[in-house]
Image (spheres, helix red, strand yellow):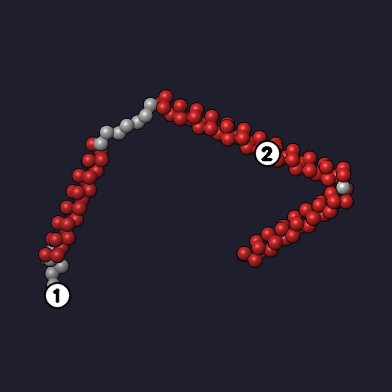
Amino acid sequence: MTDRNEISPNDDLLDKEFFETISQLNEGLEKIDALDNYNPGDQWFEQMVLRQQEQLQKKYRRELGWFILSALLILSGVIFTLMEIPQLFLILQAAAAAVTVIYSFKGAKKQVDGR
């Protein structure tokens, strides 16, 4: 039997590489710690937040405007159709209901088949 307490030359080489790697990592971490960290002041963050809020308000106003415009166009089309051609209005309502039922059925079937 061989003595397990003996250290082979390969183990010494591995230990040396391990300690070199550890020392390189420590040197790298010290260099990172030595870098000057710049933290912007509170005023910079406040200005950034104000700019973000202004942009969001503009975006919301634009979206609200498009929503109101499209709602008015849709409602005026529905009212015009209802007043002028009631048969067409009823056909469109039936078609919308049919499309909704078919779409819901297909979605439920995909959910059941997906399990």
Mark 1 touches mark 2? (CB < 8 Å): no
Q: Is residue 5 visible?
A: no
Measured Cα–Cα span from mark 1 to mark 2: 86 Å
Q: Quadrant of residue 13?
A: bottom left
Q: Residue at x 66, y 35 (%)?
A: 65
Disc 2 element = helix
Q: Residue at x 32, y 32 (%)?
A: 38
Please say if 33 is above or below 107: above
Question: Would you name the residue on which mark 2 appears?
Answer: 67
**Which of the pair 104/18 is nearer the observer?**
104
Residue 9 pos. (x, y %): 11, 64
Q: Quadrant of residue 7?
A: bottom left
Q: Is residue 71 visible?
A: yes
How busy is the neighbourhood of tag 2: few (under 14 within 10 Å), some, or many (20 plus)?
A: few
Q: Quadrant of the C terminus?
A: bottom right
Q: Amino acid at mark 1?
A: Met
Q: Amino acid at mark 2?
A: Phe
Numbered badge on residue 106: none
Question: Would you name the residue on which mark 1 appears?
Answer: 1
3 relative to 107 in the view: left or right: left
Please tell me which of labels 1 and 2 falls first in the chain.
Answer: 1
Q: Residue at x 25, y 40 (%)?
A: 32
Residue 64 pos. (x, y %): 65, 35
Disc 1 element = loop
Q: Quadrant of residue 33?
A: top left
84 relative to 106 in the view: left or right: right
Please say if 111 is above or below 66: below
Q: Residue at x 17, y 57 (%)?
A: 17
Residue 53 pos. (x, y %): 53, 30
How busy is the neighbourhood of tag 1: few (under 14 within 10 Å), some, or many (20 plus)?
A: few
Q: Quadrant of the N terminus?
A: bottom left
